Amino acid sequence: MNERNKPTSETLNAMRDEAYSHAVAAGFHADGHTQDHYFCLVITELMEAVEADRKDRRCTFNLDQIYDVEDDAAFYTIFQAKVKDTVEDELADTAIRLLDYAGYVGTRIDTLGSKVYTERPFTDMAYAVANILFSIDDVPIDTVITVAIGALFQWADRLDFDLTKHIEMKMRYNRNRPRLHGKKY
């Protein structure tokens, strides 16, 4: 696996803390939802990635061109025009939802889970990640979260993009969004 998709535990836990902190500030934990609710939102992001793949929406924009843009309004505009709603963006959203839930339940991410067979077709891979979440009755929650996040990093590697950078950029984008990102929940 490419080094860019092998984040350290420090990086993963910093992203977990930021994702959870933003979710709390944005109101995503105000109503005390169930685990099923949070996992449903993870699966929703996976399905948005499938839809982006079906529409062949890939991010071909070099993120380095906006990584250091200091003006938040300019960053937001460029991100929305060049990155938002692509496969990479939706898989970053999936990871952010999992990182947020890891923060919510207090999971420390020290290692990523076992190898998932990433040579599967896109839809099969999306189902494989969702299926990890369905194993919750048989596997401890910490393991479920780390295996699912690990699968996303392996998948990003196969798709040849830097998931860590996409997560960081999406979290920056999210900081400029309204409460609940303008949604009901």
Image (cartoon, rainbow, N blue to C red):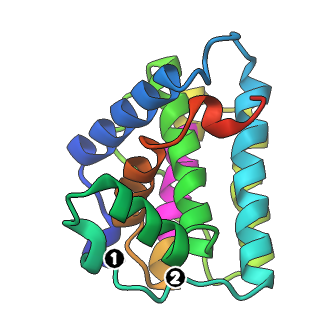
Q: Position of residue 176 (x, y in %)?
A: 44, 43
Q: Position of residue 126 (x, y in %)?
A: 73, 65
Q: Are marks 2 and 1 in contact (CB under 8 Å)?
A: yes
Q: Amino acid at mark 2?
A: Cys
Q: How many angstroms separate mark 2 from mark 1 (CA)?
A: 9 Å
Q: Which residue is mark 2?
A: 59
Q: Nearer the viewer, residue 89 or 5?
A: 89
Note whether residue 164 is visible. Answer: no
Q: Give the residue type at disc 1.
A: Leu
Q: Would you identify the image quadrant in which residue 183 lies? A: top right
Specify start and end residues of the magenta stretch as a single range: 145-155
Image quarter in which the C terminus is found: top right
- Horizontal side of 90 relative to 76 (left or right) equals right
Label 2: state its secondary structure. loop
* The N terminus sits in image quarter: bottom left
Type of secondary structure dominating the magenta stretch: helix
Residue 175 left/right relative to 137 = left
Q: Is residue 131 left or right of residue 129?
A: right
Residue at 72%, 23% in the rendered image = 35
**134 vs 11, nearest the viewer:** 11
Looking at the image, can residue 74 be seen? yes
In the picture of the structure, the residue carrying the numbered disc 1 is: 63
The structure residue drawn at horizontal position 43% and vertical position 59%, both measured from the top left corner, is 76
Q: Magenta stretch: residue 146 in it?
A: yes
Residue 55 position, x and y percent, is: 78, 84
Task: Please give left or right for residue 171 compared with residue 35 in the image.
Answer: left
Q: Name the image quarter holding residue 123.
A: bottom right
The foreground one among 14 and 137 is 14
Question: Is 105 placed above or below 23 here?
Answer: above
Q: Is 88 above or below relative to 6? A: below
Task: Report the disc number at residue 11.
Answer: none
